[in-house]
Image (spheres, grey):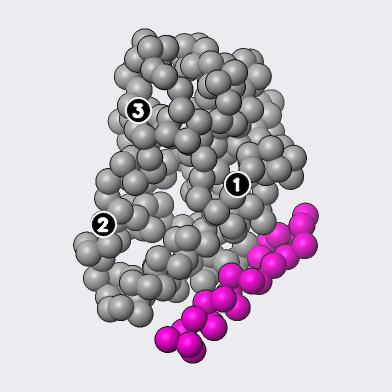
Amino acid sequence: MISNEIRDSLKKICLALNNQHVEYLLIGGVVVGYYGFQRISGAGYSGRPEIKQDVDFWYRPTIENYLRLVTALDELNIETRELKNLVFDSKKTFLRIPFDTFKVEFLPNIAGIDSFIESYKSATQIELDDNKINIISCNDLLKTKRLLQEKLIRLTLRN
Amino acid sequence: MKIEVYTSVEEMKLSMVEDSISPVESLMQCLNLLDFYATLNKNNKLEKATNEGIEWIELKFKSE
């Protein structure tokens, strides 16, 4: 279950991404919830569980797709001057939009999966109030949690 | 709204500091993750389910 605020933002963002033909996948806590598991977002990082949820996207890390993403952010009235002057790096250009109660993040790569294209092919497309949203497949979502899993086990055993 | 730019996940998620986690918290998160794997595998109807993650966790506990 996501809050109405996140739901509304998700709709607007995905509409802009679709309008600009951005290749993206919705990943992270929102998708975890879609596949049936309600988790406390943020618990994997800080050790201090947070109720709030962030919205994470994996975008295809090519210069063409990055430029389409910047145009989509323009459409959302996000300040993008810095992005236009930035030298795009397919491995290092991570973007975050800090809203008041949650964050929206765009990642060029994610741990546990090498190929955006392969993951994109197996993605699931859902509709949210007539908006099409591409979400990472359940199998790929499980792969992304492997590193977190290893880290947590190391910590638990060490403690 | 101004956008923030980072060069890595670690930089973006500054709170990923291992030392800040307590033994109880790390154990709780492990159990939470096991629950996560079990739930997602159970709900993974569209694709062939894999329980590789859960088996891997069990093996690591025994071998340590």
Please tell me which of labels 2 and 3 falls first in the chain.
3
| Vertical comparison of B28 with B63: above or below | above
Kindly identify which numbered label has been placed on residue B18: none
Q: Which residue is mark 1?
A: A114
Q: Is residue B1 left or right of residue A92?
A: left
Q: Which residue is mark 2?
A: B17
Tag 1: residue type?
Answer: Asp
Tag 2: residue type?
Answer: Val
| Vertical comparison of A91 with A130: above or below | below
**Residue B55 lies in magenta, yes or no?**
yes
Q: Which residues are magenta?
A: B41-64
| Vertical comparison of A32 with A158: above or below | above
Label 3 marks which chain's residue? Answer: B
The answer to whether tags 2 and 3 share a subunit is yes
The span from disc 1 to disc 3 (Cα, nearest Å) is: 22 Å
Tag 3: residue type?
Answer: Val
Judge by depth and name the residue closer to the eye, A14 or A108.
A108
Q: Position of residue A20 (x, y in %)?
A: 62, 15
